[in-house]
């Protein structure tokens, strides 16, 4: 072969390699910070409902949580105004409800709130091999995403109750996180605010409302904003309903609005409730939603909530104390309260490699120990017994 032919063959071989890109390999994907462009949070309702994020709306039964969510939907579909007077750009809404019938309950409430029904789409099931099936987010999320993309301009997704998305044990942190992720991903891809409705646990009045959300702490940890609705007595003894921000990782985490549940007849013979918004109120959710007579129970209720948090997070595992602290912050629970609860539960704390501390539950947890810290005086004593922490927030020996 001549030199010219050899050179030409080498050039053609190199060109072929250039044309064939390297195959995409499975593995971890890393993105360099310099390649990212900082972006502000995009809001549907400024400082209350963020596009692409999960929100939890919680409260005791009978507080109108679903009616509040439908008021959000009415504002979105009609391009109306939020309770603070700000204008909302019109958009479409998806609603998946496992508790209320769309025709005789949800639609009448939407009409009473002034919604545009043509912009509301109800998830009523899915078709599998020609057969109608109940909607299953673990199976049908890709199909729902395709439908939402076809509709276009979906700006709000309501799931009532949010526990419907969890096929496993909704009290287990890991299972709940895994089950919520497809919904969170859907909201992020559609650029829609996701609102999940849930209940308060019994008792706990006076504690941080975020800690009273039923089920795993993952519900409030994964949510970027937690909204709570409750009826309480004011100092003058009058009943009032308040929607308040209990937690927010992306904006203000206090303040709220008074609201009233009214009845109307949007169509002849069709009666439905709707939300009438009142004045804005200032203060934390705990301050706004605690009756004056319940103030003395605040500390003990907070401790009980922190104890329940620890039992969920630790379970049968040995967990780094820093991981517990991160989970507590995500769930909106003060680290000081967690340390108190860890003492009351007899949490075992051991130093491991590199001086890191690890927590685990004792084989037999004595919940009756909580009675020993049910007042501020005894809790202060426990604080004095809590090991000091170093600058990284871990216990010192």
Image (cartoon, grey):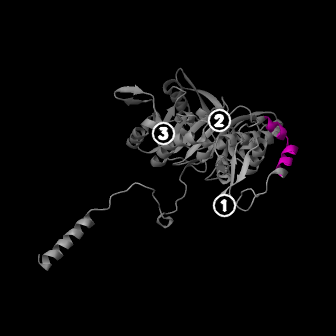
Q: Which of 174 and 40 lies nearest the eye of the viewer?
A: 174
Q: Which image quadrant for residue 230?
A: top right
Q: Secondary structure at mark 1?
A: helix
Residue indicated by mark 2: 214
Q: Which residues are magenta?
A: 368-383
The residues tagged by marks 1 and 3 sit, at their Cα atoms, a distance apart of 51 Å
Q: Which mark is residue 84?
A: none
Between residue 56 and residue 203, name the one nearer to us: 203
Residue that carries the numbered disc 1 in the rendered image? 354
Up-down: is 106 above or below 144? above
Q: Which mark identifies residue 93? A: 3
In the visual, does 136 lie left or right of 371? left
Q: Position of residue 184 (x, y in %)?
A: 51, 45
Q: Residues within 10 Å of mark 3 (few under 14, many from 20)?
A: many
Closest to the observer, 265 or 172: 172
Sequence-wise first label, 2 or 1: 2
Q: Is 367 part of what is drawn in magenta?
A: no
The majority secondary structure of the magenta stretch comes to: helix
Which numbered disc, 2 or 1, marks the residue closer to the eye? 1
Element marked by disc 3: strand
**What residue is drawn where x is 68% and y is 40%?**
311
Quadrant housing the N terminus: bottom left
Residue 98 appears left or right of 356: left
């Amino acid at each position: 072969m001549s030199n010219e032919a050899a050179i030409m063959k080498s050039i053609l071989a190199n060109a072929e390699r250039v044309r064939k890109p390297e195959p995409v390999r499975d593995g971890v994907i890393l993105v360099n910070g310099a390649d990212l462009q900082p972006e502000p949070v995009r809001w549907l309702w400024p400082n209350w409902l963020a596009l692409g994020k999960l929100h939890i709306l919680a409260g005791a039964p009978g507080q109108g949580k679903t009616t509040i969510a439908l008021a959000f939907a009415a504002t979105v579909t009609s391009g109306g105004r939020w309770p603070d007077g700000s204008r909302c750009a019109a958009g479409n809404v998806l609603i998946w409800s496992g508790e209320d019938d769309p025709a005789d309950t949800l639609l009448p409430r939407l009409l009473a709130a002034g919604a545009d029904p043509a912009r509301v789409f109800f998830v009523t099931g899915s078709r599998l091999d020609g057969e109608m099936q109940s909607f299953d987010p673990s199976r049908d999320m890709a199909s729902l995403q395709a439908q939402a993309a076809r509709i276009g301009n979906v700006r709000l997704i309501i799931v009532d109750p949010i526990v419907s998305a969890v096929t496993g044990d909704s009290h287990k942190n890991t299972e709940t996180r895994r089950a919520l992720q497809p919904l969170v991903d859907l909201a992020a891809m559609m650029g829609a605010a996701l609102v999940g409705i849930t209940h308060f646990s019994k008792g706990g009045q006076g504690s941080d409302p975020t800690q009273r959300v039923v089920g795993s702490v993952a519900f409030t940890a994964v949510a970027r904003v937690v909204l709570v609705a409750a009826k309480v007595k004011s100092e003058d003894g009058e009943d009032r309903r308040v929607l308040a921000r209990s937690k927010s990782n992306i904006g203000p985490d206090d303040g709220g609005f008074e609201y009233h549940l009214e009845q109307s007849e949007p169509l002849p013979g069709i009666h439905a409730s709707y939300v009438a918004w009142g004045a804005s109120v200032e203060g934390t959710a705990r301050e706004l939603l605690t009756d004056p007579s319940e103030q003395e129970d605040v500390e003990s209720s907070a401790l009980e909530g922190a104890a329940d948090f620890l039992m969920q997070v630790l379970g049968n595992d040995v967990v780094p104390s820093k991981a517990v602290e991160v989970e507590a912050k995500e769930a909106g629970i003060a680290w000081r309260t967690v340390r108190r609860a860890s003492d009351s539960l007899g949490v075992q704390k051991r130093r491991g490699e590199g001086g890191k501390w690890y927590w685990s539950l004792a084989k037999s947890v004595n919940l009756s120990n909580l009675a020993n810290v049910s007042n501020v005086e005894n809790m202060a004593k426990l604080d004095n017994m809590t090991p000091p922490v170093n600058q990284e927030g871990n216990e010192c020996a």
